[in-house]
Amino acid sequence: MSAARKMLQKALCCYTADTLIDIDTVKEFCEQSSKWILKREKEVDMMKDIKTRADNIDLSIGHVTQSQTRGKAFLEYMKSKVTQVTADSRRADLEEELAALLKSTLEGLEELDCFLAAVENLAVTSLPLFMEENQVLHLPEGISPVTVQLVIIAARKICPHLLEFKRVADAFFCPKLQNVEVLAYQLDKYIRTTENICEKLEKSSFCDFSLKMNDDTLVDLAVDLSEDDTQRMLHHINQLEELRMNQSFRMMFLFQEDEPCSSFIDKFKERQQRMEQSLKDLEEHAVQLDRMNKGAKISSVAGSSVGAVGGVLSIVGLALIPVTAGVSLALTMTGVGMGITSGVNSAVTTATEIGVNHTYQKKAREVFESFMEDVQCLQECLEEVTERETIHIDVLGVGKVFAKAGVIGARAALWRSEVDSWQKIHDLLCEGLKISEENKAILETPIFPERKMKKR
């Protein structure tokens, strides 16, 4: 056997084996997905519990006025006031508890990453390589080329939903008590999307897939191949392997078509500098508010439509919930921006303090409103790619959304991680678009000679 044939056999064997291993990885995760989902749902519940206990550390009078059992609520309110001396230490304890919880969450997301990577690999795997009439590949017993093709097709159909997970988990899921409700929402969103992906993949006929790799060769090149065919096939399989490892091409493939890629690139490029400046300004205003107030609050005022908007906004706007999903931009832009109200710890608030607070609040609101317009545009662009249905959002805890010092800065940090993720998507798409059609042609071109391959 010539050197070229040996290299071709090795390359085909590796590519086929990697494909089967990816299918096995996907199948194994889908089979265990109910356990994974249950663990993550428990973590969401624990995050909500931490949020409730954090709220109870410093209750507002709204806790009493909004309660149906005002006597009990009043006692809870008074208890929170007389125990303020230990408030900071209790918040610190809760943040430590959140950090331990998020360690488990991040471990679970690492497991998910292996599954998602396998799905993405399969989406950019060559279909023609696994033609039923193929006489070169010899798949393990019980695995047919048709089964492999069906899994690849299913991965391609579902792959746009992988965009949902294109953020750096450990940068987003940081143990900041001010963001715990945001983290609970996003983790729950991950759970629902993962559940949807698994359900659709399980319908792709791989339920009977059983990978039993052995030392027997997966590739038989004892066929009438010319040296030219051998060299062409070797070059092609090497190209396929490069495509499967090419992050830019993989990102392009998640968008399916060039048009939405170009649309996202243009919209992000137009808004990127403005969003970066908005985040910088928000962080500066947050510092000033914290200095003046020793704690800025996000609140929802009982019986006030403006307060309700502030409550929704603190979850919808800053919690990364798509504005298009049930809450209009008009609502988002109404009222008090981020629902910021001064949270002065002293018993007396001077007129000067009120004036300065109002100034910084107004500036922060204006910056945030501009920022959210840009965010909505990019979110809608990604929503179109994933083809998600507009559904009613059950907003967590609206009407009782409180946070102490640093909340604006903490939320701005979350948004910064999100903008960084969009920047990476933008950069990969820019690179991938350069030779998009050429790469897609490589993926869809038959690797074997068109003529019938007869054994010697």
Image (cartoon, grey):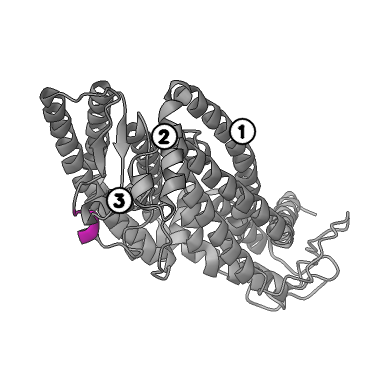
Residue 238: image location, x then y, percent: 61, 52
Circle 3: element type:
helix
Residue 192 against residue 4 in the figure, above or below: below
Based on the picture, tell me whether residue 101 belongs to the magenta stretch.
no
Q: Label 1, label 3: how many angstroms apart (C-alpha)?
A: 28 Å
Within-10-Å neighbours for mark 2: few <14, some 14–19, many 20+:
some
The residue identified by callout 2 is 78
Which dot marks residue 313?
Answer: 3
Nearer the observer, disc 3 or disc 2?
A: 2
> Which residue is identified by label 1?
100
Q: CA distance from mark 3 to mark 2?
A: 28 Å
Residue type at numbered disc 2: Met
Cβ atoms under marks 1 and 3 closer than 8 Å:
no
Q: Quadrant of the C terminus?
A: bottom right
Upstream in sequence: badge 3 or badge 2 = 2
- Give 247 or 54, whichever is nearer the viewer: 54
The residue at the far front in this view is 71
Q: Which picture quadrant has residue 354? A: top left
Residue 89: % across, % down: 50, 22
Main SS, magenta residues: helix
Q: Is residue 88 above or below residue 359?
A: above
